[in-house]
Amino acid sequence: MKKIILKTALKTLAALAAALVIGLTILFLGFPQHMATFAERTGDYNTATAFSSLRYKYTGDTDDLARTVRDAIFAGNDKKTVKYGDKLILKTDFDEYCAEQNEYLSTTEAQDYVGDYKQFICGSLASAKYRRGDAEGAIKVALDAVSSVTDFTYGNALAALSVEVIKKDDAETARKLLPEVEKFKTGEALADITQLLKETALRLEKA
């Protein structure tokens, strides 16, 4: 009798475990946007990236792709930032989407951190490319992003990339960036970044 009861209990537990696994699988795969939101709220941006990218795979929507890129940036995941960031900036509605995000950010405190949305995305992408060893790709992304920018601020993509180059003490790349930065005539970051790039570039001559 005891064996029968034990077997029944074990079967019941196994069935419950199977049901739980199936339920969680349905939740994870069927509602990735909700799982991404939960992960973002807990600060687990690597998990958020996994779910938001799954959501993008389902929809192909620019907003879902941009969310994936933001999650990857906040996770410090350069590989995913490059993978999805490259796709985002090639979207035909990327500039329109950035304008919409700027309008939204203007009503929130997040603008103080993000600044101009396009520059934030492209600066983060350029920096991630550079850290992964693609200096030429990083420069292209940064220069494309600032092609219509007049003031050289700390928030623009070229400034963000310049900071990475200066931090790494990369004289060769600094020499490539310097003439591009010097094309600007105004901006809060112009003097500081120009001087630091010059100092970094000089190390190549001294080497």
Image (cartoon, grey):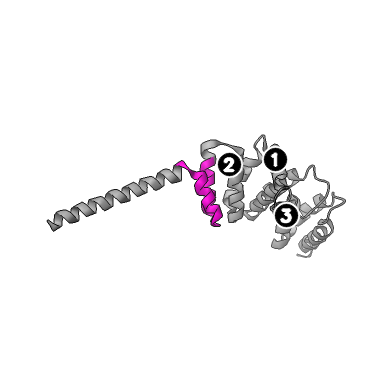
Q: Element type at marker 1? A: helix
Q: Does the magenta stretch include residue 122?
A: no
Q: Closer to the observer: label 3 or label 2?
A: 3
Contact between marks 3 and 1 (CB within 8 A): the answer is no
Observer-nearest of 199 and 158: 158
The residue identified by callout 1 is 100
Residue 124 appears at what percent x and percent y?
67, 51
- Point out the residue furthest to the top here: 92
Q: Element type at marker 2? A: helix
- Point out the residue furthest to the left here: 1
Q: Relative to 154, is 67 above or below?
A: above
Residue 145 appears at what percent x and percent y?
74, 44
Q: Amino acid type of disc 3?
A: Asp
Task: Give the residue drawn at x 80%, y 49%.
Answer: 180
Task: Give the residue drawn at x 54%, y 36%.
Answer: 59
The residue identified by callout 2 is 64
Q: How far apart are marks 2 and 1 (CA)?
A: 14 Å
**Which is nearer the N-term, disc 2 or disc 1?**
2
The residue identified by callout 3 is 112
Q: How crowded is mark 1: few (under 14 residues within 10 Å), some or many (20 or more)?
A: few
Contact between marks 2 and 1 (CB within 8 A): the answer is no
Q: In this view, does 114 lie to the left or right of 67?
A: right
**Which is nearer the N-term, disc 3 or disc 1?**
1
Dominant SS of magenta comes to helix
